[in-house]
């Protein structure tokens, strides 16, 4: 994930290029200013093939949002969101590859993905799935399956496979039924939680 200012990267890239490359970058690194002279957008040719593929919304010297068309198919496929300190906050992507972000990845202190937020509506304000990662990969996911703003499905993962899936079936905000898996095989169904949330009924699944 890139945390430096795109403008600074552009300047450095131009300085390091040969004369033909400098001319090409000059043609694709295009600043836009408002009436007060403040920088509002900066374009860039990220893969240096002579075609603009990156657009960064600027607030003067501070980047706000970068949009990239990495495969140059005419649709944006990467969004980089920056905070008030010009640090990269999250990276958006499109699972449908339709030019609209529907997933946003957040990195931990080590630069690796720590959380992904997903929106079935391609709307950053309507997140309905939250995935949590550690060094082993995906470890947990929470989901709002009916878009009512309340989480009603909880999953845990081990070695890339679902370990448990719990569901809130009576809409009281807590799990009413939990499925437990051994690899791809369902082995146990738990239900009828007591007042403390402990399941009182367990059914072994024989296959």
Image: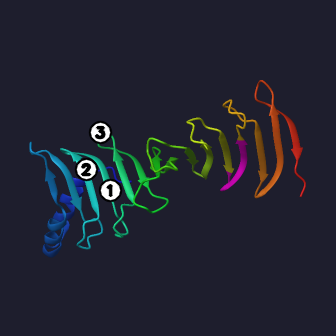
Residue named by callout 2: 57
Q: Quadrant of the C terminus?
A: bottom right
**Magenta span covers which residues?**
158-166
Q: Earlier in the sequence, mark 3 or mark 1?
A: 1
Disc assigned to residue 67 = 1
Question: Relative to 154, is 82 on the left or the right?
Answer: left
Question: Which image quadrant for residue 62?
Answer: top left
User: Mark 2 touching mark 1, by CB under 8 A?
Assistant: yes
Q: Quadrant of the N terminus?
A: bottom left
Secondary structure of the residue carrying tag 1 is strand
Q: Is residue 146 above or below residue 32?
A: above
Secondary structure of the residue carrying tag 3 is loop
Residue named by callout 3: 85
Q: Earlier in the sequence, mark 2 or mark 3?
A: 2
Residue 145, magenta (yes or no)? no
Mark 1: give few (<14), some (14-19) or many (20+) Cα within 10 Å. many
């Amino acid at each position: 994930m890139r945390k430096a200012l795109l403008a600074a990267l552009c300047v450095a890239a131009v300085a390091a290029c040969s004369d033909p490359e400098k001319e090409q970058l000059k043609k694709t690194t295009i600043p836009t200013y408002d009436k007060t002279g403040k920088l509002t957008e900066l374009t860039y040719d990220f893969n240096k093939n002579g075609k603009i593929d990156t657009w960064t919304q600027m607030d003067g010297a501070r980047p706000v949002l970068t949009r990239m068309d990495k495969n140059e198919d005419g649709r944006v496929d990467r969004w980089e969101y920056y905070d008030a300190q010009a640090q990269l906050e999250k990276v958006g992507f499109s699972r449908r590859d339709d030019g609209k972000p529907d997933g946003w990845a957040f990195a931990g202190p080590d630069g690796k993905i720590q959380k992904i937020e997903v929106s079935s509506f391609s709307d950053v304000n309507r997140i309905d799935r939250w995935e949590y990662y550690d060094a082993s990969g995906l470890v947990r996911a929470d989901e709002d399956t009916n878009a009512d703003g309340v989480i009603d499905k909880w999953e845990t993962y081990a070695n890339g496979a679902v370990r448990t899936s719990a569901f809130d079936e009576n809409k009281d905000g807590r799990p009413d039924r939990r499925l437990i898996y051994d690899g791809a095989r369902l082995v146990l169904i738990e239900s009828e939680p007591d007042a403390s949330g402990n399941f009182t009924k367990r059914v072994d699944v024989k296959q």
